[in-house]
Image (cartoon, rainbow, N blue to C red):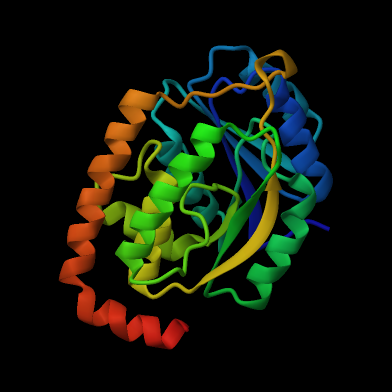
Amino acid sequence: MASSTHLVLIPSYDPGRRGVEAVLEARRHWDPVWVVVDGSTDGSREALEGAAASDPGLRVMVLPRNCGKGAAVLHGLLAAAAAGYTHALVMDGDGQHPADRIADFMAASQAEPGAMILGRPIFGTDAPRERVRGRRIANFWTHVETVGRFIGDSLFGFRVYPIGPLVDVMRRVPWMRRFDFDPEAAVRLFWRGVRPVNIPATVRYYRRDEGGVSHFDYLRDNVLLTSMHFRLVFGAIVRLPRLLARRRRFL
């Protein structure tokens, strides 16, 4: 039975051969699933549109050019809100995220609709060491920005968001449109008073010969994340009295 409140939203940019597999796997676990094709040129758009033609539970939206993960998510959120949905589970379209946990995360959201349900990754031996080390640094700064360890992992994008608060936050700031979306969304929603609920979930990193694709640019995206953390640390200082009060409420 299709949910009238919760949907799966997948931003997709040149996901490679695993892109369609990941979307179809998500469909096996939830209805509906919406995909925002973010200017892909690898043929995945045509494959996804072909799958959607015979599946009313799958909707494919297409952006004519690559705008970034956050921009693609916002496009989908606005369409979802207009259709009456209240929550979206955002996941990557490259097969790294565990589609078999979708129902568990949705159930947690339905039990506490005012919260954001955040995946806390369980890494296997396939996880690149530099990625794991980088996450420790990113999570340290996120803990500073929220005055506590409320956000289990700032970069893991397998999450259920309440659509209204997230859209409102994104409309108020010009950032959060590219790779900075995941950490800034969690921090700014926390600042707004949305309680984080952290749930463990496995993550898989595919090798290139297994169809793994990464669009992370170490120079460009690390500069983007560094500037984001400068901005958020300053914002946390300005909000410090409120954050300390929230810390006591969420503990």
Q: Nearer the viewer, residue 27 or 101?
A: 101
- Residue positioned 35% across, 40% down in the render: 177
Q: Is residue 57 left or right of residue 235?
A: right
- Residue positioned 41% across, 65% down in the render: 165
Q: Nearer the viewer, residue 80 or 220?
A: 220
- Residue positioned 40% across, 23% down in the render: 217
Q: How many marks?
A: 0
Q: Is residue 73 left or right of residue 89?
A: left
Q: Nearer the viewer, residue 211 or 3?
A: 211
Indicate whether 72 appears above or below 245.
above
Quadrant position of residue 17: top right
- Is residue 14 something one can see in this rendering? yes
Can you say which quadrant of the picture contains the N terminus? bottom right
**Image coords of residue 43 (percent x, y):** 63, 12
- Is residue 88 something one can see in this rendering? no
Q: Is residue 38 left or right of residue 167?
A: right
**Image coords of residue 70 (percent x, y):** 42, 41
**Image coords of residue 153 (percent x, y):** 51, 55
- Residue positioned 29% across, 81% down in the render: 244
**Image coords of residue 26 (percent x, y):** 75, 42
Q: Nearer the viewer, residue 14 or 206?
A: 206
